[in-house]
Image (cartoon, rainbow, N blue to C red):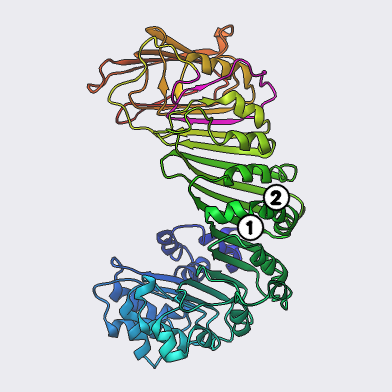
């Protein structure tokens, strides 16, 4: 067996990279074989902040500065221009330099003694409108070696006065491969065809300007057939509306694209006018295109009442045979309606006709007007629920809707992970400590619809319920119908009490992990049964009396569980009191 001291240096570096920086220091002291690899890794990236012992670091860098590849200089009260020059001179072989204080750019510009010939990336942390004029000049000085450039504001007056505009400025960076342009103005438009004429080697482009991709006067068809740009691998783009012409331009020009992320702020009027054309384009052209990519995302935001989420439900129906899906719904109640949708896909290299899909919805609906309508996720589950393996539903505290779990599991037969979360204010006393009759219109209630068929073939493994109202009948139905369930979490849930002593019977389940995290939500006397009643030899009782002055009444908990249970955790009260159970 190879001893740790005999491992190759390259392997040791990879191992040390997995441990914290303070541990890397200790690794240098273990033995001679570990010293150099640990030292090389520790000094490869230096971040100077207010707590850094600056004088000691500068002294140490006099002998180790050649190992530094990334240097980030943050605010430090003891840092002056002389110490700054010492830092730069000691770390003259760095690849990456980040300056968090605007003054540092001016200091670097005034220092002509250090060439920084290996500098690949330089950036400055500041608000885009307040970017110091010195930054552009500093980056320009190292233009021969710079491969990655961050341009905070394309309409900066410095770019116009000193370099003749953003395009002339970029034209000087002959080795530029990674370019980020955060913001600008409609006064200085940056068109794609002009940008790629001056930046001929780009591999990654992040552009959030919201500008047209090409001059509106140009013919769309001629732009789509523009000469291919083969080096671009990653494109992140922001558009002010969905343009089929722009998508076709991208799909035809960037022939080796691997990652394509696009954000769109879509006006509702334009959407309603073009939605049928967009639907046909997405199905016939966009889907085949994203299957060729390793990763893609399409994010659309729209204000007002719209049919965007219903359209996406129909659109994703075309994907259900080729994808495994993770879907998240954030549903809020508000008078100003809004729809935010983000579709992400990841395609495996082994099967380019199969994609893993992640859908994120933020749906703000005015439930004061549409009181009779169901929750807006229903149509999605009916449309493409068969492909969903992971589902998260988050309801704001003002939605006041009940949730039919049997409907979710019926429409999503392959669902394995389910999280249902209802945001609500913590009540001052335990609610529902009465014999109040519950029905399907009770807010926050989770229930099984008795008219639904049995769910014996459900594949649900993990169930997390937060903030919902739970009845004994629900947990009993869950135990009887969902045999695949392995783990259940009940977090800040309310429990309905029919009698003074209430039993929540899950004895027919195969649950192996049970977590109860509760704050003032339990009935006065409660029993959770997690074992078969006809197998007392395998059963154990655990009794937890909880007494707190803040409670109106003390809470008594009784657990009955079988030996096959792997883990159980109970957290009760304002300040969680954890009961550890040895199983």
Q: Residue, x 52% and y 53% (percent of image)?
A: 301
**Is 171 above or below relative to 184?**
below
**Is 279 above or below relative to 474?**
below
Residue 404 on image: x %, y %? 55, 24
Q: Residue, x 42% and y 61% (percent of image)?
A: 21
**Is 546 above or below relative to 349?**
above
Residue 152 on image: x %, y %? 44, 74
Disc 1 or 2, which lies upstream in sequence?
Answer: 1
Magenta-highlighted stretch: main secondary structure?
loop
What secondary structure is marked by label 2? strand
Q: Residue, x 53% and y 67% (percent of image)?
A: 33
Residue 256 part of the magenta-drawn span: no
Q: Where residue 263 is drawn, which disc sits there?
A: none
Q: Nearer the viewer, residue 36 or 198?
A: 198
Residue under label 2: 355
Residue 278 on image: x %, y %? 66, 55
Query: Can residue 540 be seen in the rendering of this structure?
Result: yes
Mark 1 crowd level (few <14, some 14–19, many ≥20, 10 Å Cα): many
Q: Are marks 1 and 2 in contact (CB under 8 Å)?
A: no
Q: Label 1, label 2: how many angstroms apart (C-alpha)? A: 10 Å
Q: Is residue 158 left or right of residue 18?
A: left
For the N terminus, the quadrant is: bottom right
Outermost left residue = 549
Q: Which residues are magenta?
A: 440-468
């Amino acid at each position: 067996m190879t001893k740790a001291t005999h491992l190759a240096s390259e392997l040791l570096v990879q191992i040390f990279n997995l441990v914290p920086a303070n541990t890397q220091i200790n690794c240098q002291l273990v033995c001679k074989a570990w010293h150099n690899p640990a030292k090389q890794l520790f000094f490869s990236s230096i971040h100077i902040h207010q707590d850094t012992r600056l004088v000691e670091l500068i002294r140490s860098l006099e002998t180790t500065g050649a190992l530094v590849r990334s240097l980030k200089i943050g605010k430090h009260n003891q840092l002056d221009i002389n110490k700054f020059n010492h830092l730069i001179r000691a770390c003259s072989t760095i690849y990456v330099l980040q300056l968090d204080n605007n003054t540092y750019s001016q200091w670097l510009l005034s220092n002509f003694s250090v060439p920084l010939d290996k500098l690949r990336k330089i950036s400055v942390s500041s608000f885009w409108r307040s970017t110091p004029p010195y930054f552009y000049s500093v980056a320009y000085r190292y233009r021969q070696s710079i491969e990655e450039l961050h341009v905070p504001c394309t309409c900066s007056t410095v770019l116009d006065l000193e370099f003749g505009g953003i395009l002339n400025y970029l034209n000087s960076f002959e080795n530029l491969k990674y370019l980020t342009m955060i913001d600008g103005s409609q006064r200085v438009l940056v068109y794609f065809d002009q940008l790629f004429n001056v930046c001929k080697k780009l591999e990654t482009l992040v552009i959030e300007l919201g500008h047209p991709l090409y001059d509106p006067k140009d013919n769309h068809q001629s732009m789509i057939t523009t000469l291919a740009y083969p080096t671009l691998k990653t494109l992140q783009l922001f558009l002010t509306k969905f343009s089929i012409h722009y998508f076709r331009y991208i799909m035809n020009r960037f022939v080796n694209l691997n990652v394509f992320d696009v954000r769109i702020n879509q006006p509702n009027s334009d959407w309603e006018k073009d939605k049928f054309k967009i639907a046909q384009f997405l199905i016939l052209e966009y889907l085949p295109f994203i299957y060729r990519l390793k990763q893609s995302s399409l994010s659309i935001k729209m204000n007002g009442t719209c049919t965007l989420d219903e359209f996406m439900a129909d659109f994703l129906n075309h994907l259900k045979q080729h994808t495994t899906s993770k879907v998240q719904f954030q549903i809020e109640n508000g008078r100003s309606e809004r729809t935010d949708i983000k579709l992400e896909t990841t395609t495996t290299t082994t099967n380019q006709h199969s994609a893993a899909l992640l859908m994120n919805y933020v749906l703000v609906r005015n439930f004061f007007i549409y009181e009779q309508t169901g929750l807006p996720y229903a149509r999605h589950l009916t449309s493409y629920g068969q492909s969903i393996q992971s589902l998260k539903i988050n309801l704001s505290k003002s939605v006041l809707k009940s949730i039919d779990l049997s409907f979710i599991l019926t429409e999503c037969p392959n669902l394995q992970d389910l999280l249902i979360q209802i945001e609500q204010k913590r009540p001052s006393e335990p609610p529902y400590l009465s014999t109040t009759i519950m029905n399907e219109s009770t807010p926050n209630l989770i229930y099984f619809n008795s008219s639904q068929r049995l769910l014996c073939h459900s594949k649900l493994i993990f169930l997390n319920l937060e903030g919902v109202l739970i009845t004994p009948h629900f947990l009993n139905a869950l135990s009887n119908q969902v045999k695949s369930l392995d783990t259940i979490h009940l977090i800040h849930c309310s429990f309905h009490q029919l009698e003074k002593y209430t039993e929540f019977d899950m004895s027919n389940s195969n649950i192996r992990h049970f977590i109860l995290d509760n704050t003032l939500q339990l009935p006065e006397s409660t029993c959770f049964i997690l074992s078969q009643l006809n197998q007392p030899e395998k059963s154990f009782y655990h009794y937890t009396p909880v007494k707190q002055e803040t409670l109106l009444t003390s809470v008594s908990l009784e657990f009955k569980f079988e030996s096959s249970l792997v883990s159980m955790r109970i957290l009760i009260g304002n300040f969680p009191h954890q009961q550890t159970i040895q199983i």
